[in-house]
Structures are given as C-alpha cells and as structure tokens.
C-alpha cells in the first residue's frame, strides 16, 4: 500500500445526514439529499463545516512534507511586488507589497525618481489582513480619491473619500455597493452602483435585485444621494455608470447577465436630462472606450465576432451612421484603452498578447514590442500623458514593469521582479490538439529543461472555459514549486473563453457547454498519448466556472485523473440562479426554470452526476464562508455527496476557509496557506517526493 493510500484509509469522514427534498422539473423528479446545507447560518451547518475542516486538517497534517511545501512557497512568495505606476496631477501612484504583507500598500511619489510615501495602507484596516482595498478613483483634478473596501472577501463594498492634500478622510460613508465603479464628475462628486439595503442575516446568500445608479455629492450623507437610473421592471439586471475623461458624457451600461449589454449616454455639455439609447440590448456585447468630441468610441462584436472599434453619434445611433475606427482582424480584440491622445488595442494571438497603437482616426502607428509569448496589461493613461507604464508576465517570467514613451514608441525595462529562482531553467511550449468535434485547442506546457516524455511526469492541467475569460500566460509561485519537483504545468485555452473571439465563446456556452468538458478531457488524453504523463500522474484544477469544469470532468471521466481540485465551483446547475448574483449566469449556462435548458443542465451538473459505488480521483474541494459570488452551498453539497458515493481508496475532502470569499482581496497569509495545502495534497496523491 502506498503512503497516500495508507493515509486515505484512515479518514473518519463525518456522517452527513440525508434529508431528501424532491423537486419536479417538467415531470422529472429530482432528489436533493443535502438541501439543508444551503443554510449556512444554521448551527448544524456550522457544526458540519467544523467537522469537515477537522478531517481535512488532520489529513493534510499527515502529509510528511506539507510544512516544507509551505516554507518553499512562502520563501518564493517573499519578494517585493509592484504594480505599474500611473500618473495623476503631478504624482505617480503605485501599489507595492514588501513580500509577505497581507495587503499591498498604495504609494505615491513626485515623478518617476521621487521618494515614495504611503498614500493608503489597507493593512491598518484589520489585524488579520481580511479587509481589502478594492477600488481607488481620483477626481478629475486629483483633489480627492474615492475608494472602496471589502471585508472578508465579500462582494459587498463600502466607499469613502480621501482628501489627497491632507490625506484625511471626509465624513462621507457609502454602503451596500456591489459590482460598481466610482466615476467622478469634476471634483464635486461621483456616480456609483448599489443594491437596496439587504437583510443582515441573508445578505450573503439571497438573490441580488434592483441594481441602481446614484450620484454622490461630496460632503453630504448617502441618504441625500441622487437617483440617476433605476429599472423597477427588471430586477435582475446590473447597471454601471462611466464618465468620459473630459466629463462631456455620462454613459450607462446595462446587462441582463454576463453576456450582452445595452448602452445609453447623456451629453452633459448640452445640459441633457435624459439618456439616449446608443445600442439596444442584449444581442451583442458592446462597451464604452472614450469619446472623440461629440461621438462615442465603442468596442463591439456586432457584425464582428473578433470585435472592432466603432464611432457612434449618440443622437444618430443607427448602424448606417456608424464609422469603423479599428476594423475586425483575424486575431481577437480583447480591449481598447486610451492615453496621450492615442488608442491602444490589445489582441490575443493564440492566447498571447499583441498590442497596437492607433490614432483616434484609426491609423496604425506601431505594434508595441513585448519580450515574448506572455500577457501584458496596463496600456494607457490620461489624454495629456506623454508616457505610461505597463506590466508583462509569463509562466516563468515574474511580472515586470516597462516604461513606454508614447511619441517614440521606445520601451524600456523599469522594474524587474526579484524572485529567488532562475527562469532560464524553464521553458514554455505551446502545442495544439484536436478536440472531440474537430476543434483545434491550444495548451501551454511549462517545465524544467531536460524533461523527458516518458509517460511518468506529474502534470497539473488547469482550465477555465467560460464567460469570455481568456486563459493567458501568468506567473505563479505555486506552479514554480510544482515544476521544481519535476512537474509539468499545463494550461489549456478551452472554448467558452475569449482567446479566439466571440465564436470561441459561444462554442462553449449554453447548450454547447459540453464542448468545454470535452476539450479538457481531450487535453488530458493528448498529454497521455504524447507521453507527457499518465493517468496515475495527472491532476486537474480550476476555480469558479473552472470549479464546475473540474466537477463535470471528474464525474464524466473519473478513470482519467488521479487528482481533482475543484475550487469555489458552481456545482448545482439546477439551483445556482437562486443565490446572490447567480441569476446573471443564466445567459452563459441557461436555467433549470426553462424546460429547454433543464435536461441539458441536469445532464452535466456535477452534484447530480455523482454516482454511488464509483471510484473517484483524490479530491480536495475548496470554498470559503464569505463567498457571496458562488455561495459555499455548492461545494458543501458536492463534497457531502462525493463522500457518500466514493467507493475507491482516494481521499475526498473539503477545505473551507474562514473570513474569505471567492478569491478577491485574500490576504497573503491565506493565499500561501491555501496554495500549500492544495500543492501538498496534489503532490502527495501523485506519489511525488519533495526534494
């Protein structure tokens, strides 16, 4: 018996009570044995969480090298981390983490060579680092900074205003903000989005309804804020406000979910009181970029699956009046930003960033040269800026900051990350495989040089596959530790993302969702066929929608993987729309409330497709008590049923973090603890040694 099997055989799983609840979906009876775990406020659920965490803690503590894994991750993570500086009213602002600070600190300095001073330190907001700085927005002339904070990883935010000169906060306090920007009108006030005050007991689980936009005048109480936009006929919509840099236009973007938007605008220079409909919802996915005088620049996939930039007169928004500024290209246009009077268009070429500089009339100035295959971001600034900074990273290239001169196009390295490892020891390849229906799907493979394709290499296969989110190269300390020990990190660009435009997204959503799981399974089969690894050495991992991915793959092909790590996953596809913001995912998944969607969702819902008597991979489910994006009930119910169904020798555990949420704002200490637990569990169950 192997060490991991021996440890697994000793696991005293909690006896989770079975209390069947039967739902009737269009004549199909569906039994939910663990509905009671959806009440995370009950004493019984809290006791279950405590007992499950004890079992998991005891197992992880029994891994001989768990502490060594933690120490190595902590050591590598302990390097200064900087954001790209941005200019505002004579100051350069940037975030810095000394290495192991729980939250990054916002600094400022005069000019690129000035002496840094602390502008805002979120570590002082709590003793354990669980209060995070979410958003900072400076007023037009830099007199004030509006900022929002979030507690314990929740999506709920509070907003405050800081006087930039004195560094003191004003008395203003705004509550119950969620999914919002802070968009200033001059130095007098700003627009934001919020929900009605929720019930305190159910604020972490109840459905979010009636998103509205308000205007806050500085120096006044929130109760005096002016209602700017509300839609009482459609409670399940989100709306965000955006002011153009010159403050001429107030723009609104309304969505019925994560796919599709409706755009409206108001010309403030002419004293308009009503919004004009610019693009009706919700067949396309447009977004505001800027204005060019009286016209609006809008990124759209209307007639362009790979997206294009168009110029629209908001008073004559008919399509035959549209002007194309940047036409559609074979590569997928991800975003367009502005700075120094130019446009910066960011594309993906086989999931790697390409950036081009254009004039506002659409004339190509140049391609911005990047160090290689990787991910770059942060292009742009204000209209009067002469330069800006951007960040570039890849799998073995820690995030480094480059200075860009807008006029000349000269790029120079400004700050290199100092991580205690040698990037030259690693290499990244991109390979392609053919999925079940013939689609050509890319995989990035990163590993120590000298790797031999002998079918016995440990592989961690990571994917997401949804919501137009592209999986591009990124640096991870945890992955470096895995590769140091002989592992291969494989990242697959599944359908459902934006890597190849809207067609790639649509091929992995709604009734095409199975394509995503087929792609992930196909990637695993390819890596085995090409002798990179074998089933006994293969782990799969993903979070959120990627957690759903892992749940679906391990229930459809439990024989294919040795380890599965579903993190904060959407596991109950019949009830996700009933909690917090889950209704917004109906445009991506469909809804069990619709007969045409029910059977498809029921066919792959991870929670419902666990089968008694099946040997499942070694599984570590992860979630957190303050996750109000994907409520922890998904993971609770999945883990309870998985433990009841599993007939094999592999451990099936759940790790439930406290004072943490879906992932955003998580303090460094918790990031390292979780990464160490996941990596130790993965390596141990892949029968890896730690050298």
Image (tube, rainbow, N blue to C red):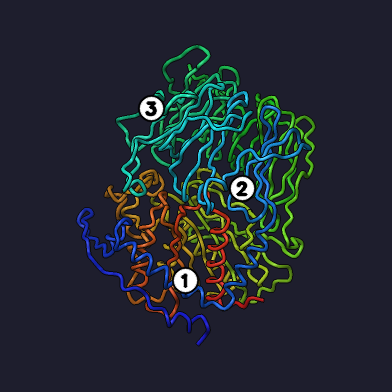
Evaluate whether residue 48 shows in this view.
yes
Q: Is residue 679 above or below residue 274?
A: below
Depth check: give the residue in front, 303 or 112. Answer: 112
Q: Is residue 348 above or below residue 141?
A: below
Q: Quadrant of residue 602?
A: bottom left
In the shown orientation, is residue 630 left or right of residue 248?
left
Give coordinates of residue 674: x percent, y percent.
53, 62
Q: Is residue 278 above or below residue 499?
A: above
Q: Give the alpha-carbon distance from disc 3 to disc 1, as whole Å.
A: 46 Å
Q: Which quarter of the rendering shows the C terminus?
A: bottom right
Provide the secondary structure element on which disc 1 rests.
helix
Q: Residue at x 61, y 47 (%)?
A: 104
Give coordinates of residue 643: x percent, y percent.
36, 72
- Which residue, given by chain and number where applicable, does mark 3 sit on? 223
CB under 8 Å between discs 2 and 1: no
Provide the secondary structure element on which disc 2 rests.
loop
Q: Bin the neighbour count of mark 2 within 10 Å (Cα to Cα): few under 14, some 14-19, many 20 and up.
A: many
Q: Earlier in the sequence, mark 3 or mark 1?
A: 1
Q: Quadrant of residue 174?
A: top left
Q: Residue furthest top?
A: 270
Q: Earlier in the sequence, mark 3 or mark 2?
A: 2
Q: Give the alpha-carbon distance from disc 3 to disc 2, as whole Å.
A: 32 Å
Give coordinates of residue 368: x percent, y percent.
73, 39
Provide the secondary structure element on which disc 3 rests.
helix
- Which residue, given by chain and number where applicable, does mark 2 sit on? 104
- Which residue, given by chain and number where applicable, does mark 1 sit on? 57
In the shown orientation, is residue 96 left or right of residue 413?
left
Give coordinates of residue 440: x percent, y percent.
56, 56
Q: Bin the neighbour count of mark 1 within 10 Å (Cα to Cα): few under 14, some 14-19, many 20 and up.
A: some
In the rendered structure, find residue 38 and report the number of the disc placed on it: none
Evaluate whether residue 302 shows in this view.
no
């Amino acid at each position: 018996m192997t060490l991991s099997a021996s440890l697994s055989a000793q696991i005293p799983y909690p006896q989770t009570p079975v209390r069947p609840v039967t739902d009737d979906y269009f004549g199909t009876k569906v039994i939910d044995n663990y509905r009671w775990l959806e009440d995370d406020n009950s004493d019984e659920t809290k006791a279950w969480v405590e007992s499950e965490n004890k079992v998991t803690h005891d197992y992880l503590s029994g891994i001989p090298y768990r502490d060594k894994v933690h120490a190595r991750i902590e050591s590598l993570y302990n390097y200064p981390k900087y954001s790209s500086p941005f200019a505002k009213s004579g100051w350069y602002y940037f975030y810095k983490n000394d290495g192991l600070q729980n939250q990054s600190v916002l600094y400022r300095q005069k000019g690129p060579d000035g002496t840094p001073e602390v502008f805002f330190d979120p570590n002082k907001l709590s003793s354990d680092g669980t209060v995070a700085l979410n958003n900072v927005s400076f007023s037009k002339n830099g007199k004030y900074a509006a900022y929002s904070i979030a507690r314990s990883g929740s999506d709920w935010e509070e907003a405050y205003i800081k006087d930039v000169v004195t560094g003191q906060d004003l008395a203003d306090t705004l509550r119950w903000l969620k999914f919002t920007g802070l968009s200033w009108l001059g130095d007098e006030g700003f627009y934001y989005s919020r929900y009605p005050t929720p019930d305190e007991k159910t604020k972490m689980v109840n459905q979010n309804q009636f998103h509205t936009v308000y205007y806050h005048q500085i120096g006044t109480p929130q109760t005096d804020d002016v209602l700017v936009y509300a839609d009482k006929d459609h409670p399940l919509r989100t709306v965000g406000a955006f002011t153009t840099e010159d403050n001429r236009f107030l723009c609104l973007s309304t969505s019925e979910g994560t796919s599709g938007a409706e755009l409206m605008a108001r010309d403030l220079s002419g004293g308009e009181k009503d919004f004009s409909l610019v693009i009706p919802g919700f067949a396309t996915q447009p977004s505001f970029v800027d204005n060019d005088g009286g016209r609006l620049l809008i990124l759209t996939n209307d007639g362009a699956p790979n997206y294009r930039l168009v110029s629209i007169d908001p008073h004559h928004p008919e399509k035959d009046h549209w002007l194309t500024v940047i036409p559609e290209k074979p590569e997928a246009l991800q975003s367009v930003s502005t700075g120094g009077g130019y446009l910066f268009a960011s594309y993906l070429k086989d999931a790697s960033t390409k950036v081009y500089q254009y004039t506002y009339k659409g004339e190509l100035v140049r391609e911005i040269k990047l160090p290689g295959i990787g991910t770059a971001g942060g292009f742009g600034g204000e209209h009067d800026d002469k330069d800006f900074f951007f960040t570039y990273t890849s799998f073995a290239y820690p995030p480094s900051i480059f200075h860009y001169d807008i006029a000349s196009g000269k790029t120079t390295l400004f700050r290199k990350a100092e991580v205690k490892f040698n990037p030259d020891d690693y290499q990244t390849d991109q390979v392609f495989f053919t999925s079940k229906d013939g689609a050509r799907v890319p995989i990035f493979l990163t590993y120590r040089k000298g790797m031999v394709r002998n079918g016995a290499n440990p592989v961690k296969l990571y994917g997401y596959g949804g919501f137009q989110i592209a999986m591009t190269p990124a640096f991870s300390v945890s992955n470096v530790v895995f590769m140091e020990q002989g592992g291969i990190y494989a990242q697959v660009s599944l359908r459902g993302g934006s890597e190849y435009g809207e067609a790639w997204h649509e091929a992995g959503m709604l009734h095409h969702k199975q394509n995503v799981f087929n792609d992930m399974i196909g990637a695993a089969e390819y890596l085995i066929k090409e002798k990179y690894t074998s089933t006994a050495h293969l782990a799969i991992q993903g979070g959120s929608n990627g957690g759903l991915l892992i749940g679906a793959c391990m229930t459809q092909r439990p024989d294919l993987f040795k380890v599965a790590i579903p993190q904060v996953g959407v596991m109950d596809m019949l009830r996700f729309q009933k909690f917090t913001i889950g209704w917004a995912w109906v445009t991506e998944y469909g809804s069990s409330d619709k007969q045409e969607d029910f059977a498809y969702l029921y066919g792959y819902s991870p929670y419902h497709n666990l089968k008694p008597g099946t040997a499942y991979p070694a599984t570590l489910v992860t979630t957190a008590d303050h996750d109000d994006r994907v409520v922890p009930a998904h993971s609770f119910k999945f883990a309870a049923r998985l433990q009841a169904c599993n007939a094999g020798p592999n451990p099936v555990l759940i790790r439930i973090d406290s004072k943490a949420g879906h992932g955003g704002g998580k303090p460094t200490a918790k990031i390292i603890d979780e990464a160490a637990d996941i990596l130790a569990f993965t390596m141990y169950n892949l029968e890896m040694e730690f050298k």
